[in-house]
Every structure is written in structure tokens, then in C-alpha cells.
Amino acid sequence: MIGFRFGVSVGWPGSRSEWVAKARRAEELGYDVFTVPDHLGMPAPIPSLVLAAEATERIRLGTLVLNTPFYNPVLLARDVAALDQFSGGRIELGLGAGYVKDEFDSAGIPFLGAGARIDHVEQTVRTLRKLYADPGYQPAPTRPAGPSILIAGSGNRLLRTAAQHADVVGLPGAAFTESGLMTAASADQLAERATYLHGLLGDRRDRMELNLQLWAVATPSERDTLGDRVRRWLPGFTDDQVGAAPAIMAGTPRQIADSVRECRERYGITYLTVLEPDLDTFAPVIELLK
């Protein structure tokens, strides 16, 4: 059985000293992976991870996830390989198809249809694998296959791409409503996506690591304010959805640990990532599960 891993996604800007402190704090608390998102207005992923690598010793470092259509695959391969070298082989590359049209518009990058964006994700993975397999490629990553690759998404086609090419698959803890609001994925919705993915994986099912990003983690005293807190960045969540969503956990550390075990039993998820505000709240859960 695949063991649990836990990550934290850190994207709130700060000074150099604040960023270093965040990376070191995550490592001290026992997190396995320190990840950064890829959104305009937040720190640039590659240089942020270079600094995090310099400030830490053990914790792995990743993107969760890059807006892959922003990047030329050949140039991205160079940056990722150099980052992998500088970190001593601690990089995990997370890729997504991108979904925030306004960011594409601001960057002057065409926001193509979902199919074209997924094509770019697949092309990027194929390019990285091909370049890194060349013994003469420079800068060489620390292992011939290059860093582990996570692909995250919810649609059938992106999950098919992930099942074929990824080392880790990120399952959705949220979904878009018809009006375009992001809302919580229910337990049944997440189970349906996990079942679909497992069918694609076949005999690789027991070897594939599945990731889920938790939108919020709360103590018992914070239950009454949890809905308002989640809606600050995800306005589509209703109170009922907040209470039932697998990607939102509340309770004592032991109760949350039980919820994490349920994620493994029901969905096959063993790698969970919390957001930066929940860094300290979730830490006691890690102690119970490691």
C-alpha cells in the first residue's frame, strides 16, 4: 500500500526572509512537499523554488500546478532540469491545462479551447521525457527520466493524459458550475472521477499516487466560520457543500486523520496538499499518520 504524503501550497507574496521562514517551517513540521501555484500576482514558481531549495535540506519542492500553456516546452525543460540540479533532485513538476482566462489575457497568450490546452500539456510531457532521455542533454536532471511529473485536472481527456504520462495524478476537489463559479466537489463526484481514473490505470492502479488539494482545514471551534472563510476565494461553495466536501476537513486532529484515511479507502488518495493558512492546523494530523 502506498504510504501517505503531505504537502503545503504556498503562494502569498512576502519578503525573502518570510519566504525562507515558510519553507523551513514546512520542513520542520514534517511536510513532505513544499509547492507553489502559478498565478499572476503571486511569486514566480521557478525562482521561488530555487530560494526554497537553498533554505531547506529534506523537503521536496514542486509546482501545483504550472499553467502549462504559458510555457515553451523546450525552455521549460531547461529551467526544470537546472532547478532539479540546484535542489539536489528534490523537484516534483506539477502541470495543468490552465483555467483562468483573465490571466491568459493579461499575459497576451491566447486562451485556446480545452482540447488545445490539453494537447499542450501532453506535448510538454513528451518533450521533457524525450530531452531528458538523451544522455548528452544539458543541463542534465539528476535522474535520466527527469523529475516526477504530476498532472492535475478533472475532465475525461485530461485524466486520460495523466493516466498515460504522469507519475502522480491530481484529482479535483472542486468543480465549475454552469455560471462559471468554482464550487466544492461532492463525495460522489470525487468518487466518480477516482473510479474513472482507476479504470484507465488498470494494473497500475495500486502503484499510482493520487493527490487531493484541501481547500480548508479547521478546528472544531472554527466550524461556524468555515463557510465564510472558504467563500473568500471560492464563492460557489454553499454551507451544505462545505460540510460535505471531501476537500474540506474540520474537527480534532484525530477526526481529520480519520477523514484522511477515508480518502485513501474510498478514493485511493494518499497524497494531500493543504493551503498555506492551514500549515500549522494540519501539522498534528501528520504526526498521527506518519
Image (cartoon, helix red, strand yellow):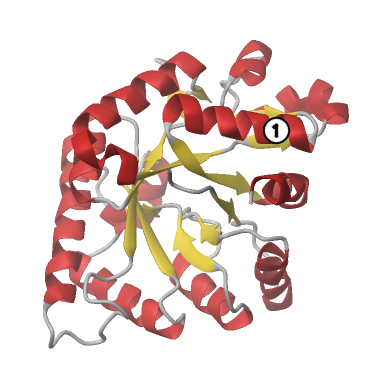
Locate residue 282: give its quadrant: top right
Q: Is residue 277 left or right of residue 114?
A: right
Q: Nearer the viewer, residue 238 or 285?
A: 285
Q: Position of residue 221 (x, y in %)?
A: 88, 28
Q: Is residue 112 visible?
A: no
Q: Is residue 152 left or right of residue 5?
A: left
Q: Is residue 133 left or right of residue 256?
A: left
Locate residue 196: give its quadrant: top left
Residue at image location 43% in from the left, 43% down from the top:
1
Locate residue 215: give its quadrant: top right
Q: Position of residue 56 (x, y in %)?
A: 61, 77
The kind of secondary structure element at disc 1 is helix
Q: Position of residue 13 (x, y in %)?
A: 65, 62
Q: Nearer the viewer, residue 247 or 117?
A: 247
Q: Position of residue 144 (x, y in %)?
A: 22, 76
Q: Is residue 239 visible?
A: yes
Figure check: 84 above or below 275: below
Figure check: 111 above or below 129: above
Residue sticking out furthest to the top: 240
Residue at image location 54% in from the left, 77% down from the top:
53
Q: Assess disc 1: are there few (<14), some (14-19) or many (≥20) residues with their C-alpha within 10 Å of its C-alpha.
A: many
Residue at image location 56% in from the left, 78% down from the top:
51
Figure check: 229 above or below 40: above
Instruction: Give the labeled residue for mark 1.
Output: 256
Q: Amino acid at mark 1?
A: Ile
Figure check: 120 above or below 259: below
